[in-house]
Image (tube, grey):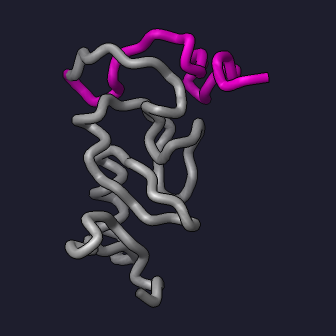
Amino acid sequence: MGWANCGTDSKGRPIGYVFTATCDHPGCHTQIDRGLAYACGGMHGKDEISCEGYFCEQHRPTYIEHEGDTRQICSQCTKELLDSGEWIEDENEGCLRSVHDDC
C-alpha cells in the first residue's frame, strides 16, 4: 500500500496525496493535497513537534531538526515550540533545534 489513500485523520478528513484540499491556515485558499508533502512535520497525525494540519509552502515556513531529519512545520507549531523554551532558532543552520542538542 502506498501513501495515496491512508485513511482519515481525527477530523474525519481523508488523507493521502490523491485527496484535493486547501491549506489549513485560516483564510488561505491555496490548493494542496493531504499527502506527506503538505503535512506539518512531514507525517500524518500529531506528534511532539507538529500538528495534524496540511499547509501550503507559505504556511509551513519553518525547518526543524528532529530525530535526525529536517522537517517543515506550520507557523502555529513554530510558535508553540519556541514558547515552550525547549526549542531555539539556530540562525547558522536556518532552522529550529532542541535546546538539548549538543551542536
Above or below — where is 92 with respect to 43? Answer: below
Q: Where is residue 2 in the image (x, y as percent from the top left)?
A: 72, 24
Dividing the picture into quarters, in which one does residue 79 lie? bottom left
> Which portion, as a residue range, is magenta?
1-27
Quarter of the rendering occupied by the N terminus:
top right
Q: Position of residue 59 (x, y in %)?
A: 26, 37
Furthest-front residue in this view: 93
Q: Going by the image, does 3 lie left or right of 78? A: right
Q: Position of residue 39 (x, y in %)?
A: 47, 35
Above or below — where is 102 with respect to 14? Answer: below
Q: What residue is rendered at 50% in x and 22% in y?
A: 34
Count of numbered labels shown in the rendering: 0
Furthest-bottom residue in this view: 102
Q: What residue is rendered at 54% in x and 59% in y?
A: 48
Q: What residue is rendered at 20% in x and 22% in y?
A: 27
Q: Where is residue 37 in the image (x, y as percent from the top left)?
A: 47, 32
Q: Going by the image, does 67 lie left or right of 95? A: right
Q: Going by the image, does 14 lie left or right of 84? A: right
Q: Nearer the viewer, residue 78 or 89?
A: 89
Quarter of the rendering occupied by the C terminus:
bottom left
Above or below — where is 64 with respect to 38? Answer: below
Above or below — where is 76 with respect to 90? Answer: above
Q: Going by the image, does 73 lie left or right of 29? A: right
Dividing the picture into quarters, in which one does residue 68 lie? bottom right
Furthest-right residue in this view: 1
Per the image, is 103 magenta?
no
Per the image, is 6 magenta?
yes
